[in-house]
Amino acid sequence: MLRYLVFWFVFRVLGRLPLPLLYGIAEIVGRAGYALAPGPRRNVWDNLRHVMPDAPKSRLRKTAKAVFRNVGYYYADLAQLPHMDIDQFFRERLIYSGIEEYIRSNIDKGRGVVMLSAHVGNAEMAGQALVPLNIPCFAVTEPVKPERLSRMLNSIRRTHGVEFMPVGVPSAKRIMRTLRDGGTVALMGDRDILGPKMLLPFFGEETWMPTGPVEVALRTGAAIVPSFSSRRGRYLIEAVAQPPIEIERTDDLQADVRTAMLEFISRLEAQLRAEPDQWMVLEPIWDAEPREPQPAKEPEEATV
């Protein structure tokens, strides 16, 4: 109940504030979160050690703090989304490339598109850019508790026309139908939440990676378009759709899924190496059951 009330206050009250003030609050919350949340802080450090194995502790600390700040910015953007002029956002705050070449071109041919993304930059804000471009999009989200909080968050995300549903059987059916009808679906490929998964090398160490997005693309014949976003300074969002992942199909679906996933992971690794502070994941990625999980070492200090 308390969690719901906190989020309700953030999204229904603070979301009405001017964005510079909202970002200022987000920075304070991000610094507090880094200092006061040892579990997520430990997870971020462990994730960054894989991405930046040779980085000194001072750089890891600086990058980890930036991750928490960017998480704060993400929630600030989401809180203001219902009050945002989406056309103004498109004109003044968005930089984009590849959407016409790799997404619209496939849609025009009647081929579905899986925009395979990750929790980098602000994928949801980048996805809102499809609205002024008249590209209908369906996306799935991680269910949160309580359920009414999940419903509230998705209702906010749907404000300007992008459709959102929590991961589950109904959304899986909607994904298949959308792709077979030649539509666009935005899915995440960097965290194992629900659905099919596979142990795959990620920054040189195996962990469970979600394979559902690639599997539905291969089953429906949809194009797999890696799509990443990055925050440029405080206010600008850059959205980049990359060339589709093309593989030679075989009679072995799982082998094809693995081949496509390895290509996606390679592109994701390049994205994260270039901008590790943009990876907004507060959960441990390298916790690959059924192997004995190795506990991440907590940083010695949490100075703000």
Image: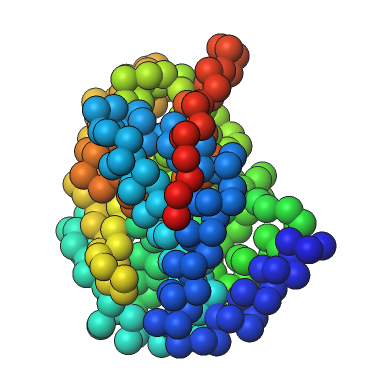
Residue 106 visible in this rendered orientation of the protein? no
| Residue 243 % position (x, y) | 19, 46
Residue 193 vertical position relative to residue 122 in the rendered view, above or below: above
Residue 34 visible in this rendered orientation of the protein? yes
Quarter in which the C terminus is drawn: bottom left
Residue 79 vertical position relative to residue 138 in the rendered view, above or below: below
| Residue 181 % position (x, y) | 44, 55
| Residue 86 % position (x, y) | 39, 82
Quarter in which the N terminus is drawn: bottom right
Residue at screen point 25% across, 82% down: 92
**What kind of colouring is applied to the model shown?**
rainbow
Residue 244 vertical position relative to residue 11 in the rendered view, above or below: above
Is 164 on the left-hand or right-hand side of 252? Answer: right
Q: Quadrant of residue 193?
A: top right
Q: Quadrant of residue 214?
A: top left
Total labels: the figure holds: 0
Q: Nearer the viewer, residue 43 or 90?
A: 43
Is 65 on the left-hand or right-hand side of 139? Answer: left
| Residue 206 % position (x, y) | 41, 19
Residue at screen point 26% across, 68% down: 233
Residue at screen point 54% across, 75% down: 79
Identify the residue at the far top of this view.
291
Is 263 on the left-hand or right-hand side of 146? Answer: left
Residue 105 vertical position relative to residue 77 in the rendered view, above or below: above
Residue at screen point 53% across, 18% down: 294
Q: Quadrant of residue 21?
A: bottom left
